[in-house]
Image: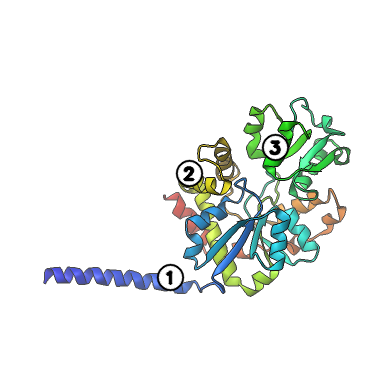
Amino acid sequence: MKGYKSLMFVIFIALLFGLVEARVSAAQPKPEKATVHIGYASQSGAFAQLWIAAQKGYFNSEGLNAEILFTRTVTGVQAMISGELDFVATGCPELFRAKRSGFDLRVIADFAPVNVYLIASRKEITDPKQLKGKSIGVNQLLDTSHVSARFALRHAGVDPDSVNFIQVGSTPERFAALRAGTIDGAVQAALFKPVLAKQGLNSLISLYDMKIPYCSGGFAASAATLRKYPRLVEATMRAVVRGHAFLGKGPEDQSKAIMARYMRLPVTDPRLAASYGFFAKDAYFGTPKITAESARTTLDMMSETDPSWKKERTESFIDASIMSRLETAGFIDAVNKEFRSK
């Protein structure tokens, strides 16, 4: 009889917890569709939050199957325009240009609210003024690397129009071209500063060291997605916030293992260690909010190539309401406390 009562007590507790879980699930209505498609434009680790959220099952816990896809910046924005992607993560200048060209989108989060770039140069170039008449490698003209380079040069007293900007490709391709000597300078992520030094290359101007507010890691959705799928958007952001918290506060070995998979690097590779150290520690910001300040500075930097950007209103390009709702509801604080206790 005693054993029977113990068994019934265990069953009662199990049913009670099942009921509680059911009520918690019911408190969060299901997303309007089961699969979310997200594109990201950099394999440097800048969007590791997305990888972690997928691999740790945070999207699944929100009732979503997540497809996380690497895309080139232009390809990713075009895919979102065509409806193939629900969200895209890339630098804000590319997103802002797409918005002004007629595609109605909004940046709803920012994983790196400061400019994370620097201009590196060949060994013999030790002063920014020596870049006059020289070639500087960027990813694409008018993208965030190009905008950042022009701003950095002007800040250092060099007329941006006095240098030749060359479209070289992504960060690894620009690094290879600089090391080979086919270009004189290159825009690089600040996380590679130690790697540049080991190769005998100079870090001439670091915008990251200046901690200038900037939208480096924009996360955007179309206005149609925000309007038609509000539950999908909020569920996605809850998963992303958890991934972001895990990156900054979770076990280092687990984050590195996930990053290694997406960056296609061995876990012992120094580039992986540099990426983790930068995005999870040095350049980690507790909440991936988009702010009017970082958007404003980004628009002002974009005026380097077109002065009309200074006239644009920040609220036309960003929507901070989703993150604000999560913050007001206490979700972000709860997630941060959860990971601090681990």
Q: Which residue is mark 1?
A: 24
Give the image quarter of residue 183. Answer: top right
The mark found on residue 252 in the picture is 2
Q: Amino acid at mark 3?
A: Phe
Q: Is residue 221 left or right of residue 55?
A: right
Give the image location of residue 32, x and y in percent.
Answer: 56, 74
Q: Is residue 179 above or below residue 148?
A: above
Nearer to us: label 2 or label 3: 3
The mark found on residue 175 in the picture is 3
**Numbered disc 2: secondary structure:** helix
CA separation in Å, label 1 and label 3:
49 Å
Q: Earlier in the sequence, mark 2 or mark 3?
A: 3
**Numbered disc 1: secondary structure:** helix
User: Callout 1 environment at 10 Å: few (<14), some (14 to 19), or many (20+)?
Assistant: few
Q: Earlier in the sequence, mark 1 or mark 2?
A: 1
The mark found on residue 202 in the picture is none
Question: Do we see residue 206 in this rendering?
Answer: no
Give the image location of residue 242, x and y in percent.
Answer: 51, 57
**Numbered disc 3: secondary structure:** helix
Q: Amino acid at mark 1?
A: Val
CA separation in Å, label 2 and label 3:
27 Å
